[in-house]
Image: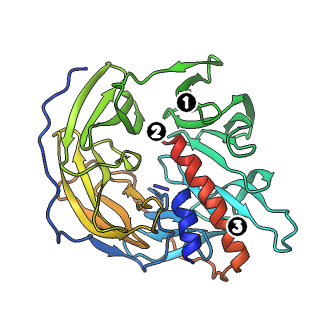
Amino acid sequence: MRPVAAVLCLLALSASGCAKSRSHPTAPQPLGQGTPLGAAGAFLSGNHFVWSALTNEIVGSGDISTLSLVAMHGTTGATRVLDSAAALLPVAPAAGTPVYYEALLLDPTLTGNDSVALRRVSLGGGAPVQLDAIPGLELYAHEISGDGDWLAWGRTIGLFTSDSLVIEATATGARSRIEPGFPILVSPDGSQFLYRTDLLPGMKLRDRVAGTSAPFDLGLPADARLAGMRWDAGGLHALYLLGKGQLHVRHLASGTSEALYSASDSLVSISGTWSPNGARVALWSDVPAVEPAHTVSLHVVDVAAKNGAVVATGSVTASPGFPLLLGAIAFSPDSRRVAYQYADQVFTHDFPVATAAAPGFVSLAGGAALAARSPSEVARLAIARARAVSVRARLSP
């Protein structure tokens, strides 16, 4: 999901057969934003979250003064620092650890020796491990298989070109390379993955076992806006929007589509987020009010029941002249809660109906104190964050 006034502006830039769907229009104000979790400012606004099944912690980039990799306990709101380096774009397997992310390594001498690294860190303890590094403020795009055995990653060379896409066996570190590109989604067992080449439209499907790649078409309507994908034992499932608020899902294995939900507000496709068990989907709607204010609501959809509701509504202010930076969304590992951001505050919402539970949680404590970064470092981090969010938006399914 995904960054002093000039810095925020930079981050903002970075930043067929269907069943009948039931309509649930946006609830009137004031609905409320939900239950606050932890202190405001713990995470960067417009952040990307991972909610770990191992530790019941939400992991993301810290506030703009540090951008360090931060973990917040999903119940207590207590935070700890996992890596003091500026960190972006965390991803994790179903087990919730390790977390893979991009670390921005800034040269304190200001002599142009900034670099970027691909790292992983275990939430169970231990120092971060560096997997790869490149000079300059480039970008890594990386995805992990659900079983955690296969990591796919690519890196930029300049603004719109990429290096060879790397496939790594996480147990041994053995790597193979294919054509330049960036991964989008990896199958649960890592045998296949979707990727794009040099940020161009269209996707390819890579069969890791057969060693082949081929163009891949989701089969969506021409006017559809892709709103997120899920890959489970039943195959690929693609969310998409028609019009301003008609949410559908296409099941690639059966070649069928279903209407899930109809909203009166304009749903934002890039915010689509699946719950771990696939039972729910959450996404934002954005209704511009008097600029730069926006009324932003969180919609949660029950996939099986094909209905949904607004669970939170609030006002968010955009930097004048720049796109609105929407908050991150993440479901808890047991799919019973959803966490989301309004500005720099994390909120949660609990679902009344229990869903299948994930493995038990282990609570960890600890962490390191951080020193605030210099204005020069903050500016460079903002530029790097802007590029990361911009490229991530291009890659988002």
Q: Earlier in the sequence, mark 2 or mark 1?
A: 1
Provide the residue designation for mark 3: 380
Q: Secondary structure at mark 3?
A: helix
| Residue 6 placement (x, y as % from top left) | 58, 72
| Tag 2 and tag 1, C-beta contact below 8 Å | no
Q: Residues within 10 Å of mark 3 (few under 14, many from 20)?
A: some
Residue sitting at 75 percent across and 43 percent down?
A: 157
Q: Amino acid at mark 3?
A: Arg
Mark 3 vs 2, N-terminal side: 3
**Cα–Cα span, label 3 and label 2:** 28 Å
Question: Going 24% across and 64% down the picture, which residue do you hit?
Answer: 312
Is 273 on the left or on the right of 179, as rendered?
left
Q: CA distance from mark 2 to mark 1?
A: 13 Å
Q: Secondary structure at mark 2?
A: loop
What percent of the width, then of the height, locates residue 73?
Answer: 44, 70
Q: Amino acid at mark 1?
A: Phe
Query: Does label 1 or label 3 sit earlier along the sequence?
Result: 1
Res. 3 in view = no
**1 or 3: mark nearer the eye:** 3
Q: Position of residue 218 (x, y in %)?
A: 41, 24
Q: Is residue 256 left or right of residue 54?
A: left
12 left or right, relative to 278: right
At numbered mark 1, what does the secondary structure look like: helix, strand or loop?
strand
Q: Residue at the spot x=34%, y=32% of the render?
A: 224
Q: Which residue is mark 1?
A: 193
User: Disc 3 vs disc 2: which is toward the camera?
Assistant: 3
Kindly indicate the quadrant of the structure image that contains residue 293.
bottom left
Location of mark 2 (residue): 397
